[in-house]
Structure formats: structure tokens, C-alpha cells
Image: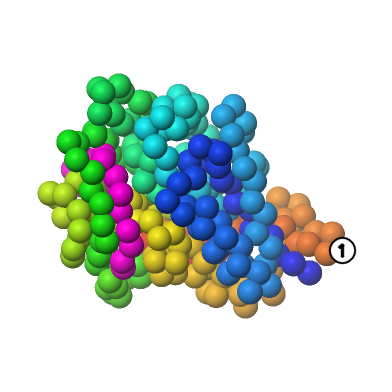
């Protein structure tokens, strides 16, 4: 019996540069090595999120591609927020990260609307921020880690007062080259400029759930609301409990 993890990949044909498709490959490989099945569902412009998605992913894109999908993404505020409230976790990288805020103003002054899921806004700067980046972040409470990646962005992302960054910059630029912050996290949602792809360079997100809950999976009991079972595949619903960090942990829906 195989447990299925459902991932909704938003705009895979537009937001797909800088090795961000590698995040899907890494997630699939890690899931398979743990005996799980990753069901990846591409979601394009005008298409609804798949029901009961466990993970939502947005990659990076150039200004042109961002402009193509921005109006559609801006209309998804309630849809994405509802999925997060229902327990899905979200990772957005670079261009996807920018457009999960309130909006992005490009180099020509064009304003692209954002989904408003993350407490931030982005404006294009004079030059690009390119190079290796190292940050310190607390992925699990009390455990400070150094995370490295690659950044290449022209946008300057400004977090709202009180917003929580993914980490603090040790070397490199981060969100804007001045604040010392990199990325943003809000409950179950994470945005970052880290490429590499991101999943291998952010330890434990989100595949740490596979190790943390592997024993719980074998003891899980399906119900009419939480899972669908046939002779070969069990569809178990998971939610990220969001405790303290990007890595967090996953728990079966309905558990404490």
C-alpha cells in the first residue's frame, strides 16, 4: 500500500527557470526512497487548485512570464489561503515569492498585482543581485543552521514590519541587499530567493515530514474525510502544524 502526497505546481510552463523544476525532481526522489508516491499536478492559468493538496509550489520566472500569470495569481488569494488554512504547506521561489506578496513593480514601472498571501512587496532595482548567498535560519526551534544557495534577482523585496524572514544573511544580498533578511515565512508558507534548487539547500523542508511521520503513517486509519483507499494506494491527508519553523512537522488531519 502506497501513501500519496499531492503537490500542486502552479504555472509550471511559465515559472520554471534557474533549476526550479529540480525541486519537483528532488521531492519525487525523496518521497519514492521513503516508499511514498508524489502526485504532481500542474495548475495553469484559469485552472483550479486540485482538492486536498498537501504542498503548493511556485518557481521563478522573468518579468515577462511573471506579467503573464500575475493577474491569475492575484485572483487566487482566497483559494491559496483556504488551502493553507486546511493544512497545505507552500514553497515559492524568486518570481513566485515576489508575486505572493501584494505586488511587484518592474523596471519600466509596470505594477503587477500579487496574491497578498505574504506580508511584503517588491520593486525592481537598478542592478541585479547575483551570486552565492549564505543565511542563518532556525528551521527547528533552538537549532540554528547555516543554509547556502544561489540568488539572481533584480527585485528588492521589503517585508512588512513584524514579518518573519526565512533567515538572516551571512553573505550575499538576500531580500534587498540592505535589511539583512532573506525570504519570508508565514505559518505554513515560505518564500525565498534561494535557488540551487531550493529543496536540497533548505534542510528538512518539506521532506522532513516523511521521516518524522513514517511510523505514524503505518498506523494511520483512513476515514471518509481524510483518505481514500483502494487495493494499492492510500490517500492520507496531511497538514503542516507550522510549529516554529520552516521545517515544521506534518501531522495527519484531525490530530492534535
**Which image quadrant: the N terminus?**
bottom right
Does the segment drawn in magenta span residue 151?
yes
Q: Which residues are magenta?
A: 147-165
Name the chief secondary structure element in magenta. Answer: strand
Residue 12 in view, yes or no: yes
Which residue sits at x=53%, y=34%?
79
Of the pair 133 and 130, the residue shown nearer to us: 130
Q: Residue furthest bottom?
A: 215
Q: Position of residue 105 (x, y in %)?
A: 28, 28
Please state if 191 lies on the left or on the right of 235 as rendered: left
Badge 1 element:
loop
Nearer to me, 145 or 216: 145
Across and down, in percent, residue 237 comes to: 64, 56
**In the image, is residue 154 part of the stretch drawn in magenta?**
yes
Inspect this view and state whether residue 138 appears: no
220 to 187, vertically: above or below? below
Q: From the image, tell me which residue sits under label 1.
A: 231
Residue at image x 35%, y 26%? 112
Tell me the colour scheme of the image.
rainbow
Residue 44, horizontal then vertical, whole percent: 59, 34
Residue drawn 31% across and 23% down?
Answer: 111
Q: How many marks?
A: 1
The correct choice, above or below, for 119 with respect to 46 in the image is below
In front of the other: 16 or 187? 16
Based on the displayed image, in which of its 4 quarters is residue 4 positioned?
bottom right
- Between 10 and 162, the one lying in front of the other is 10
Looking at this view, name the residue that lies furthest to the left: 178
Residue drawn at 51 percent across, 37 percent down: 14
Decide: few, some or many residues near mark 1? Use Cα within 10 Å; few <14, some 14-19, many ≥20. Answer: few
Amino acid at each position: 500500500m502506497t501513501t500519496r502526497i499531492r503537490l500542486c505546481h502552479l504555472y509550471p510552463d511559465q515559472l520554471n527557470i534557474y533549476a526550479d523544476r529540480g525541486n519537483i525532481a528532488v521531492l519525487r526522489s525523496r518521497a519514492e526512497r521513503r516508499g511514498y508516491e508524489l502526485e504532481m499536478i500542474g495548475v495553469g492559468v484559469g485552472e483550479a487548485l486540485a482538492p486536498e493538496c498537501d504542498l503548493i509550489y511556485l518557481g521563478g520566472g522573468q518579468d515577462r512570464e511573471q506579467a503573464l500569470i500575475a493577474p491569475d495569481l492575484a485572483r487566487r488569494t482566497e483559494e491559496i489561503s483556504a488551502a493553507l488554512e486546511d493544512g497545505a504547506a507552500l514553497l515559492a521561489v524568486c518570481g513566485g515569492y515576489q508575486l505572493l506578496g501584494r505586488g511587484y513593480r518592474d523596471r519600466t514601472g509596470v505594477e503587477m498585482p500579487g496574491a497578498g498571501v505574504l506580508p511584503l512587496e517588491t520593486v525592481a532595482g537598478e542592478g541585479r543581485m547575483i551570486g552565492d548567498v549564505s543565511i542563518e535560519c532556525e528551521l527547528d526551534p533552538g537549532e540554528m543552521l547555516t543554509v547556502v544557495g544561489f540568488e539572481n534577482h533584480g527585485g528588492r523585496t521589503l517585508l512588512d514590519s513584524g514579518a518573519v524572514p526565512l533567515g538572516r544573511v551571512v553573505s550575499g544580498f538576500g531580500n534587498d541587499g540592505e535589511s539583512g533578511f532573506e525570504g519570508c515565512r508565514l505559518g505554513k508558507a515560505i518564500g525565498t530567493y534561494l535557488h540551487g534548487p531550493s529543496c536540497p539547500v533548505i534542510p528538512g523542508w518539506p521532506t522532513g515530514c516523511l521521516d518524522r511521520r513514517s511510523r505514524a503513517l503505518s498506523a494511520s486509519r483512513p476515514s471518509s474525510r481524510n483518505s481514500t483507499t483502494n487495493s494499492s494506494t492510500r490517500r492520507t491527508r496531511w497538514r503542516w502544524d507550522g510549529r516554529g519553523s520552516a521545517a515544521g512537522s506534518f501531522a495527519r488531519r484531525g490530530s492534535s
